[in-house]
Image (spheres, rainbow, N blue to C red):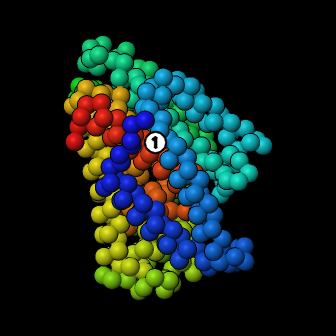
Amino acid sequence: MQKITLDKWLLTSTLLLITCGLVMIASSSIAVADQSYHKPLYFLIRQLIFFTLSLSISAALLFIPISFYYKNHKIILWGCFLLLIAVLIPGIGQSVNGSKRWINLGFMALQVSEGVKLGMIIYLASHLYNIKNITQNEVHNLGKPIIFLLLASVLLLLEPDFGATFVMSITAVGMLFISGVRIRWFILIIICMVAAMCALVLLSPYRFARLTGFLDPWAHQYTAGYQLTQSLIAFGRGGLFGVGLGNSIQKLFYLPEAHTDFILAIIGEEFGLLGVLVIISLYTVLIFRGLKIGYRLLNAKYKFHGYMAYGLTFWLGLQMLINIGVNIGLLPTKGLTLPFISYGGSSLLLNTIAIAILLRIDFEGKVINKIK
């Protein structure tokens, strides 16, 4: 059996991010865990269980050839649609804060949108691989993936999950751009997406409230802008070097979702700008390695491998950028986790699976094409 050699930079940056996440989940969740469950380390223990599960599954996936995903891409795609439909069925879908995004598996709640992102990347990479020249008959070549993307988006918006819809759509557009879609079609797709998203915001009162709160959070600091203002206070308190691990004030019931969507604000408060820059540096290494893997594989004519690598990297990188943008007030508040760091079993599981697939893609590229 061929020995599997792993990209050390990609693997190390991922493990360091997960380690940082475990430390910060322990720090940011102690107060809420003690109040809600009378167990200060409740969320840390659960995240450690999720990490063990994620590591076990990801290690197994390293031995699965990438051709498996291509051969089964239709099954994976239809499985995603079944999950999207199932989560909307009363008694199956679990509702939290007014959104029905989870299916209770007993030991964990599976957030359907996380699996759908991966499924759409696999399907789109397979579709693009089967096209010899995407610039020929582009209406036909682009029609099928756009239809599937629209259907998935509609089902996601019924949950509702606007953030996941946005990440999935932009990831798909990025993969189409890499495949060589002519610029006029690319621009047309972008215009249609922007128009649709603007309509969704303007026609939805709570999304519009989030937008107005984002534009002037201090004018709405006790309503729509509450989370953002508390996040900005956390960064302000942290300054350059932070107040020290465990010394955050904002995590003491001031900043909602401190251990999930807004965990970066707690990192900024406890470790300052320096700590945030370290986290961003680790993500930069991860994204650079992922893009490099995709570039090498496409140049080596392994199109499916290359498209998969680009899609997975776009997904992780885009979600990271959006979460950071939300935390520092550059983007409206969205319910998107910070990959590998925020608390959440589904997020950690699917993110580590994405890295395992990237590592396998890199390994196959080096073995088959002798890429160093």
Position of residue 273 relative to residue 212, above or below, is: below
Q: Residue at x 55, y 46 (%)?
A: 57
Position of residue 38 relative to residue 296, above or below, is: below
| Crowd band around label 1 with a 10 angstrom C-alpha radius: few (<14), some (14–19), many (20+) | many
Q: Residue at x 29, y 63 (%)?
A: 281
Q: Residue at x 40, y 57 (%)?
A: 14
Across and down, in percent, residue 65 comes to: 44, 32
| Viewer-closest of 230 and 130 | 130
Is 85 on the left or on the right of 200, as rendered? right
Across and down, in percent, residue 5 comes to: 35, 46
Give the residue number, with chain letter if any, for mark 1.
62
Is 312 on the left or on the right of 293, as rendered? right
Displayed quadrant of residue 26 = bottom right
Q: Residue at x 68, y 39 (%)?
A: 88
Position of residue 52 relative to residue 34, above or below, is: above
| Viewer-closest of 8 and 29 | 8
Residue at far right of view:
91
Across and down, in percent, residue 185 comes to: 28, 26
Q: Amino acid at mark 1?
A: Leu
The C terminus lies in quadrant: top left
Is residue 42 visible to the viewer in this orientation of the structure?
Answer: yes
Residue at far front of view:
1
